[in-house]
Every structure is written in structure tokens, then in C-alpha cells.
Amino acid sequence: MVNIGNLWQYLAAQAPLSSVLSGDQFNATTNNMASSITTYTLPQLPYAYDALEPYISAQIMELHHSKHHQAYVTNLNKALESHIASVVGNDIPGQIALQQAIKFNGGGHINHSLFWQNLAPASSADAKPEAAKELAAAIEKTWGSFDDFKKAFSTALLGIQGSGWGWLVKDGISGLRIVTTKDQDPVVGGEVPVFGVDMWEHAYYLQYLNGKAAYVDNIWNVINWKTAEDRFLGTCDDAFALLKASL
Ligand SMILES: [Fe+2]
């Protein structure tokens, strides 16, 4: 059986970079590592804060984007910076301790970046399901009708306990599926997030209070079906480029 105490001693005894490199080599190595790390920034919204009214208020959008999303970005950058220091210092326990912060804040950054792009003003052509002909056909094939899909998706959203997200995803095996993710867990593992809905209270409470069902009813007015179609067809550069590049 592995003795955890001995394991920590073993890990701590591993020579850190600073002890095997000269001062100049160590500085050059750490500088190279630091410069290779992306510093993430808050992406601009593709519309004004009041563009989704009356379904999502300008107050919610401004706070949600400029405060909540910004906090995920700020905390992700801090966590990644600390992680680099832990890697350079050969601090395995330190690296492990940072995993949750990277997952939570990185997921928050990814999820919100996808969310802003898969919303659109209700008056725009992109907010009409007709903008997603191929996706609509696949939805009807999977759920029988568009209305049945909306009911199933809404039920999934309202079934989320606590904070989380609902997603329509495409995978290469079973086609379209509705999934929910807890907290800020992102959709990963090869599934394509076609569109997502933020079910954290900060996404609706200032306007809808405890009327979560009304928020879910109204979100359908501002789904960007053009973006959803592009993600479904693999012709959209936002969903995946943003996971790899600076946003
Ligand atoms: Fe959110």
C-alpha cells in the first residue's frame, strides 16, 4: 500500500529546476515558460448590453459580463500564473491544489464566451430557428418535433439543482443530446457545444427573481440559431478556436 506521507516526502525531495540550472538558465527557462502562457481577456459582447431586452435586462447583462465573467478571467489568469510557479518549483502538491481553480475559472471563461455568442437580439434574423435549417432537421429527427425538443431542453434546465448549465451537444456517436453540467464544468471530451444556457441565479435573478421557469421560457427568444447551425455544421470558428487561443 502506498504511504501518502512517504509520497509527499518523495515528491518534495525531487530536485526543483532552480537546483539543477544555473541562475541565468533558470531565469531564462522561467521567463520562457511565463511568456508562453496565454493571458486571457474578457471578450467583447457582439451586441449592446440592452440588446436582449425585454427578455434579459441590460442590468443583468452588464453585471453578468463585466463583473461575473471578468472575475472568471481574472481568477483563471491568477491560477495559471501560480500553476507555472508550481511547475517551475517542482511543487506537485501545489499543482494539484490549483486544479479546481483552473477548472472552475477556466470553465467559467469558456462557458460564458460560448453563451454570449449563442445569444442574439430577438429582432435579428439569427434569432429565428429558420437560421438553422440543418440543425432543425436533426432536432426533429431526434426529438420528433422542434416543440418536443424545446420541452425536453426546458425540463432539463429546470431540473438543474443549484448552479449549472444546460447544453445541446453533438457527438460523433449518438448525434444530438441534451446535457447539463454542474457549476462551471465545461463541455469537454469531443462533444460539440451547439448552444448553452446559463442557469446560475446571476443570469436571471435580478429580473425574474424566483421565476426561473419564465427565464427559461424567454431564453428561446434570444437563442442565436445561426451560431448554433454553424457549430453544428463545424463551420463556426468561435466554439473551438476560443478554447485554444486568447479570447
Ligand atoms: Fe453566468
Image: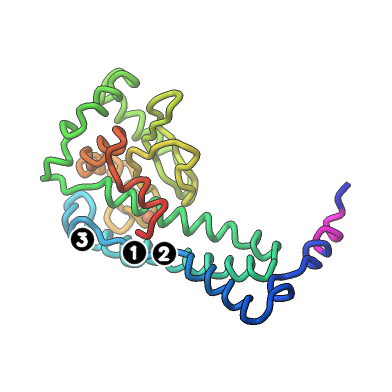
Mark closer to the chain start, 3 or 1? 1
Image color mode:
rainbow
Instruction: Name the kind of residue labelled 1 in the image.
Output: Leu
As for residue 7 lying within the magenta part, the answer is: yes
Instruction: Name the kind of residue labelled 3 in the image.
Output: Tyr
Residue 221 or 211: which is nearer the viewer? 221
Helix, strand or loop under label 3: loop
Image position of 3 with respect to 79: above or below: above
Quadrant into which the C terminus falls: bottom left
Mark closer to the chain start, 1 or 2? 1
| Part of the protein shown in magenta | 3-8
* Residue 42, label in figure: 1
Helix, strand or loop under label 2: helix
Instruction: Name the kind of residue labelled 2 in the image.
Output: Val
Residue at disc 1, CB closer than 8 Å to ligand 1: no
* Residue 49, label in figure: 3
Query: Which residue corresponds to mark 2?
Result: 73
Q: Residue pushed farthest bottom? A: 23
Residue drawn at 57 percent across, 70 percent down: 82
Mark closer to the chain start, 2 or 3? 3
Q: Quadrant of residue 19?
A: bottom right
As for residue 24 lying within the magenta part, the answer is: no
